[in-house]
Amino acid sequence: METSIFAHRGASKLAPENTMAAFTLAQKMGADGIETDVQLTKDHVPILIHDETLHRTTDGTGYVKDYTYEQLTKLDAGKWFNEKYTGERLLSLEEFLKWISNTSLSLNIELKNNIIDYKDIEKEVLALIKHYGVAERTIISSFNPKSIKRFKRLSKEIECACLTSRRPKDLQSLIEETKANALHINYNALNRGLIKEAKRLHLPVRTYTINRPSRLMRSYKLEVDGIFTDVPHSAIEYRELY
Ligand code: G3P
Ligand code: CA
């Protein structure tokens, strides 16, 4: 089976992460899917931003959770990356789903609730996925195993992945406990032993964040199910070579 290429926060090496510019660029490049990060606003709107705070990727300050969605839409989310992206703004998950539902792209929504445990983020996200009819091509992931467990309780059908930066001490117990369907693991923890163990448990393995040619080639050689990359054009080029 061919390794799927997910554009990590969109084509985020070439356009500001988690903006429409990065998503449409990834689509043009031919990525198979888009990975994005979700936090909750003060008025409980799921919004696409990687950090809990605003200063790195917008012209705002403070925490995402302390502003309403309306307030956050006024921020610029492109200028920090390059002047030419001035005017890009933060997107709600709803806007993103509306756009992606009209494409054939897969999507990985990462619930960013390992630092702030956003109440009911799973419910809010699930309702939108159902509304836009993309359940079959969605993967939910989180570094917070409790959140995966909560999501699987709400929806058995949608694929969920445990995100981890290290090889889990007891993968089988983690999967049994959370009911996760897949493992998303940092490239530095990826090796044949882990893949063998995951295969035994019938778990797809996807790895992040793979940009260098040598790492792309090694991931393809290890036959991982998917990779997350900031450079989907390059990942596609090397996949064709492989
Ligand atoms: O989902 C893979 C990857 O995005 C997890 O790390 O910090 O880039 O969200 P991070
Ligand atoms: Ca992420």
Image: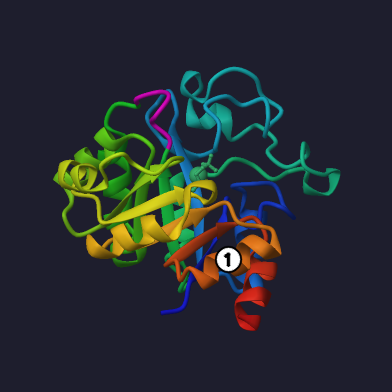
Residue at image point 60% right, 76% down:
239
Q: Is residue 188 rendered to the left or right of residue 130?
A: right
Q: Is mark 1 within 8 Å of ligand 1?
A: no
Q: Where 178 falls versus 158 (above or below)?
A: above
Quarter in which the N terminus is drawn: bottom left
Q: According to the image, label 1 marks what residue? A: 218
Magenta-tinted stretch: 112-117
Q: Is residue 113 magenta?
A: yes
Quadrant hosting residue 136: bottom left
Q: Is residue 27 rendered to the left or right of residue 205?
A: right
Q: Where residue 47 appears, x then y in whole percent?
A: 47, 39
**Residue farthest along the right direction in this orientation:** 83
Q: Is residue 106 rendered to the left or right of residue 182?
A: right
Q: Where residue 5 appears, x then y in whole percent?
A: 53, 67
- Camera sees residue 67: yes
Quadrant hosting residue 194: bottom left
Q: Where residue 206 appears, x then y in whole percent?
A: 43, 59
Secondary structure at badge 1 equals helix
Q: Is residue 193 magenta?
A: no
Rendering colour mode: rainbow
- Camera sees residue 32: no
Quarter in which the C terminus is drawn: bottom right
Closer to the camera in the image, 214 or 123: 214
Quadrant hosting residue 89: top right
Q: Residues within 10 Å of mark 1 (few under 14, many from 20)?
A: some
Q: Where 74 falls versus 235 (above or below)?
A: above
Q: Where residue 198 appears, x then y in whole percent?
A: 30, 59
